[in-house]
Image (spheres, coloured by chain):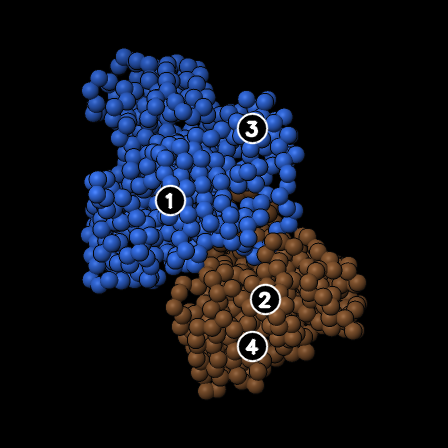
Amino acid sequence: MLKTALDHWAGAMLLVLLCVTAGAQQETQPLPAAAVEFVQQILSRSGLPSSLAVGFRNVSTTLPPDTQEAVQNAIFNAFRAANVNLVKPEQAQAEAQISFSEDWQGYVWIAAVKQGPASQVVIKKIPRRQRVATARTPTLTIRKIPVWQQDLQILDFYHDERNLLVLERGQISLYASDSGQWRARQTLGIPHQNPWPRDLRGRMEVHSGHIDAFLPGTRCSGTISPPALECRASDDPWPIDPALVAFFSPRRNFFTGLLAGQSAGASVAPFFSGAAWQEGDQRVWLFTGTDGRARLFQNDLNSPAATYNGWGGALAAVRSTCGSGRQILTSSPADTTRPDSLQAVEITGREAQPVSAPIDVFGTIQALWTAPNYNQVVNGVMQSQGTGKYEAFTLTVTCTQ
Amino acid sequence: MKRLLLPLLALSSLLPAVCVYGSSRPRYGGTVRVLLRDRIMALDPLAEEDHPATRDRLAALSFETLTEVDTQGRVQAGLAATWGSDPLKRQWRFRLRLANFHDGTVLTAADAAASLSKSNPAWKCAAPDRQTLIIDAPSAVQHMEELLASPRYAIVKRELDSAGATVLVGTGPYRLNQWQAGERAQFVVNEDYWGGRAFADAIEFQMGASLREQFLDRQLGANAAADVGIDQVRALEQTNQSVTVSSPGDLLAIMFLQGDAPSRTGRKPVDPRVREALGLSLDRAAINNVLLQRRGAPASGLLPQWLTGYEFLFPGNPNLERARDLRADAAAYVVITPIMLAYDAGDPLARLVADRIALNAREAGIVVQPYGESHVNGRARASINADAVLLRLPLQSVEPSVALAVRAEELGFGEAAPALLGATRPEDLLEVERKLLESRRVIPVAHLPQALWLNSTVHNWQQQPNGPWQLDQLWIEGAR
């Protein structure tokens, strides 16, 4: 499989400028090239007439007039380049009626060519370009920087200047930086006994070249160099963010609610994602419950200080130099039939205040994890609704000028 | 009925909202209850069925195909993990993934070969080892992956029970738990599904259900979804109910039961000029605008414009003058008798359209006598004492060559299927479709969508552009 690195630290600054409009572009043929190919097909089927009358009609409901004009001009130019005289119908050796149509996946150009009693039809299909995401005017701005894109499901990822590690369904793929491109280096398998749960989730951390990966009922440890990984059946708790560790259900897609680490022994309602931080002398936890409610706890994990509705299932905490200096990035309450969006929220007392406009991601958020580098970056994974590909990206919060 | 439905729907807006939240992360648990208008008598994808599209929706929960086509039209791996073909696209080799049937036995290539041989007896299916399946088709199949994704090619293990009855066993995310033919079906989750346990614990279907009655009983809120007629869509939308409408993919068409030569006893074939005249008399735009409430599309081809992009090349506008000339021309040579047009007596929309066809035909001097039949599909047609039937055919694939080949077979043009499946260019499909239409054995009338009411607590109910549901990612709020 051809995999293309979208980012490298050397190109990061350029991508920052493009980050919010970084929707995956479907590869489409440029219109002039498509027009040349179309004309060549017409001529090859109609026996290279020396003179041709060409007419156009538009039966598409989505082809803009200026695009139609551009395509018509490209087709005219292609005929002229092929030394075909374009003439009026009464002077023509052959007549081509070209229709701009469409199907559910793109544009369809159809030429009905009449030459004496014979007639030929030529059809060319052109995939429609996808929409790109647009940013709304924010108070704070969420920067989304694409890192990697692939067909296989991405559960989590790690990258630095030299290495990109992608946690996938049943393996970790290692890539090494090579002249600004990520080159596949090694694949480390993750053996497991039972089928993975649907909506599979996973967590990976890399510290000083040491890999720790967590999947439901499975834990793996290894090294980047030399590439090695050992896995075993395990119910060990997963690190959620630097201040939160919790047990994950081995057969489902959520954390059971039993906490570990600094909060060992405490339990909350089962949750999809969570964050914990210190606010002055106050310890704060925030969880998105499997019942659809987000719960805020302050110092005491026995009863929530506040409950919020209308949040998505994914959240992650991030540090920034804006606002209160700490924001929570949350996904929207969408499902796979509708595109997700991301928004930054600040917790003030018991209130959750949106501090950025939502940014559309044109896909489904699969994961948000606070990256370990000073908590200033959130690693995210989404599946594009347009292409079906999985995209790894980083999120940061910046101040609006 | 619509007058009554509207206030009832307004009442329904007072139904308790279970929760006003949602999440992109699916939840496990719960039972999804679905209302179906049709009554399904058997789940076997190869059985004769009056409502095959509805049957296929249920069957897909238990019986899987080697490949799948997602909502964007992309081929995905199903029970086959990988595949390839020879350069001629006649021999196809599939590598099966590790999966279990619901009875705990392992899926083998021999099981798949036996199932596919029954689906298509013209194929030679072999299993050189437990995981490798080889299909030898008598002619090229360019889009075998898309063809095998259609319900007819579901992998089904057929066994006899102690009473000698055939038991169907599948591999899908849900297994059939309770079955009352024509009444009710309950599927429970397959805990050991190779793709991971599905989210909902069970999916229940109540057949022959009336949306209107559910509103009267104020019971709709307990249901997750209901398939609805397109005549009900507007009323639902006016009360802010969530309704999804597929692209108009089903074909409503008049199919003449005999060609130019007599092939049935009792009735003479309808003269080809009269058949053509009937087609020219139809005001398809009026049928769509009035009877279909603009939810469908006038049909001049066998496949819809949104799928092929070329349907507009087939003329579909009425031409009464030409129709009258053709009728008069025919009358000079043969005695023109009334055309007996059978329609599905259980489909009120079919009756309305048949009546409108008769009305249009009369303006061209052609007498059409519509009447309802209890069964108009499949082998039942052989016993119908009619000249023509008004059929509703589901769109079986979003790959045009597969869709057209299946549709041609359903319309009695099975001989065209090899050319369609072997076509390498859309121009080839266009030409075959043109020839089928020029036989005047089939007169397209309209393309119809499929509509669905969805409760706001339901998530990931995915509907393919041609209508089938993908429910393996389905989950509901309020579950654990």
Chain A, chosen colour in render? brown
Q: Using the image, tell me which numbered label, if any, was put on residue A258.
A: 2
In terms of depth relative to the viewer, which is nearer, A207 or B141?
Answer: A207
**Alpha carbon distance from label 1 to label 4:** 43 Å
* Residue at 49%, 44% in the rendered image: B32
Q: Using the image, tell me which numbered label, if any, was put on residue B67.
A: none
Q: Is residue B342 left or right of residue A374?
A: left
**Alpha carbon distance from label 1 to label 3:** 27 Å
**Alpha carbon distance from label 3 to label 4:** 55 Å
Chain B, chosen colour in render? blue
First along the sequence among labels 1 and 3: 1
**Alpha carbon distance from label 2 to label 1:** 34 Å
Report x, y in % for residue B370: 38, 18
Residue B138 appearing in the image: yes
Which residue position is annotated with label 1? B177
Which residue position is annotated with label 4? A205
Crowding at dot 3, Cα within 10 Å, few <14 / some 14-19 / many 20+, comes out as few
Do discs 3 and 2 share a chain? no
* Residue at 32%, 30% in the rendered image: B377
Q: Secondary structure at mark 2?
A: strand
First along the sequence among labels 2 and 4: 4
Q: Report the mark closest to the observer, 2 or 1.
A: 2
* Residue at 24%, 54% in the rendered image: B111
Chain ID of residue with mark 1: B
* Residue at 61%, 59% in the rendered image: A269
Q: Secondary structure at mark 3?
A: loop
Which residue position is annotated with label 3? B217
Screen quadrant of the C terminus of chain A:
bottom right
A398 lies above or below B14: below
